[in-house]
Amino acid sequence: MKTIKFLKLTLILIASIAITSCVQDDDYSVPNDLGEAENNGLAQIMAGLNSGDLIEISIADLKALYQTYEDGQSGFDYDHFIQIPDNLVVKGYVSSSDATGNFYKEFYMQDAPENPTAAIGVIINQVDSYNQFNIGREVYIRLAGNYVGYNSNEVISIGGGTDDDEVGQFTANQISSNIFRSTTTETIVPLEVNLSAISETHVGMFVTVNNVQFPTNLAGSTYGDPNEDFDTQRTLQACEGFGYSNFLLESSSFSNFYNTPLPTDNGGSISAVVLKSYGGDNLVFLLNDLNDVQFNSARCTPLNIDDFNVVFDETFSGGQGSWEVTNTVGTDDWYAASFSGESYMRASAFDNGSIVDMVSWLISPSINFDAQDDEQLLLQIADAFSNGQPLKAYYSNDYTTGSNPDDATWTEIGSSQIEALGVNTGFFDNNYETTGLIDLSMVTGNAVLAFVYDSNSGTVSTTIDLSDVKILAQ
C-alpha cells in the first residue's frame, strides 16, 4: 500500500513569508443569510483566522507547496498528492460553472475576481454545484486533513481524499464541513489574453480572447462530435502576424450545447476557463455557457508579407557571418550548423550528460533604424529537449563590438512572442515556428540586436535553433 505523503510544518513556514501578504485585510466578518449550519461553520473559520488559530494561505502558495513536493520526485511510481496536517485555510472566487453540464463534480476558483494571479481546482462528489458554488462566489476551504495534488488532468486541485495516486473527491459530508461560502458574489472579470500567450499559469482562470474564430473546414460541425462518447476538441484560431495561432476548445458530451452548430461564419471573442485535456497533454478551453461565445465580427485574415518591405534578413546560410558570439558565463556558446537544407545558429546548455552554466550572446552587425519607420522583427526558431525557455532578445544603441555586453545598455524585446512559441520536449524535429511581430518602432539611430541563451544557472538546457532574423517595415 502506498504511504500518504504528509506536509511538514517546516514546508508551510517556507511559504509563510508570502502568506501574510495574500490576506487583503484581517477583518473577518460572518454573513448572516446562508443558513444556520453554514453560518456556524464559517463563523468558526472567521474566528480562527482572527485569533490566529487558522492561517490563510494564498492559492499560489498552496500550489507552490505541492509543486515543491512534485519536483522532488523521480520515476513514475509515486503519489501525486500530499496531505495537509496544518490549520490552513484557502480562499478563492469560483471561476467555473456546471450549469450547462460541461463541468462534472468539480469547480475551479481563482485568487481574485479581476486580474487573478493563480487558480486551483476543487473536486467534489456533487452535481449541479452551480446552485451553491456559483460563478464569483467567495469560498473558504479548510485544508487540515485534506489533500492537494493532481487530478486526472494533472491540474493541481484540492480534495477530501485520494483516488489511487491522484487527489480524490470531497464527499457530501466533507463538503458541508470543509467548504464554506461567504455571502459575497463578485463579478468575475475575464482576464484578457492573446491566444498564443495562454500558458500553464492561466489554468483554472476565466479568460477572454479577442479576434478568434473557428477554421472554415469546421463549417457544418457542432461543438460535439456525434461519434465521440465523452469529449470533443475543436480548434480555435487567431490571426497573429503572418499566420494563425491555434488553441483547443473542449466540450463534454454531457453539455447541453454539444449538438449546437459552431459559428464559423464570423469571428469575435470567447471567454472560458483554461484547463488541461485528460492526462494533461494539452491546454484547452472549457466553456461555462454558450453566451460566452460572442462571434459578431468579420473573420480575420493574417498579415501578408508582400505588404511589407524586408529591410534586414539573416538566414545564416553563410554560417555565423558578421554576427558576433561572446560569452559572459561559461564556455558553451552559439555555433553555426545546418540540417536538411536549413541553416541556423544553435545553442544548448546540455554538455556531456549534464546542464552547464551558460550565458552566450549572439549579436548582430549594426543596423540603421533611421532609414525606415515602424520596423517589426520576425524570428524563426526551432527547439528540442525543452525544459524551459532560455532565449531572450535585446537591442542596444551603445554596444561596441568586441566589448563586454554587460557594460552596454540593453532593452529587452519580444518576451511574450518568444514565450508563445510551441514547446518540443522531444528530439530534433526541424519544425521551425515564426514568432508574432516584435515591435522595433521605438529603436532609433544605429543599434544592434542580441539573442542571449541563458541556462538560468545551469537549470535550463533546451536546444535553440535560430534560423532567420527578419526586419520588416511598411
Image: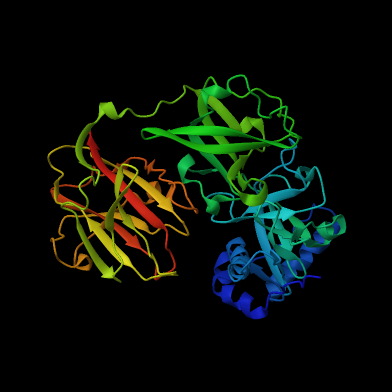
Residue 410 vs residue 52: left or right? Answer: left
Asked if residue 137 can be seen in this view, the reply is: no
User: In the figure, 60 relative to 108: above or below?
Assistant: below
Residue plotted at (47% across, 33% down)? 238
| Quarter of the image that includes the N terminus | bottom right
Confirm whether residue 471 shows in the render: yes
> Would you say 334 lies left or right of 232 here?
left
List the single residue furthest toward the front. Answer: 340
Q: Depth check: 334 or 284 in front?
A: 334
Residue 226: x and y, percent? Answer: 72, 27
The residue sitting at the bottom extreme is: 10
x and y, in percent, of residue 167 in the image = 74, 60
Please state if 451 lies on the left or on the right of 89 as rendered.
left
Question: Could you say which is closer to the camera, residue 343 or residue 93?
Answer: 343
Residue at 71% across, 60% down: 158
Judge whether 292 appears above or below 283 on screen: above
Residue closest to the eye, 318 or 273: 318
Where is residue 424 drawn, in percent x and y?
48, 50
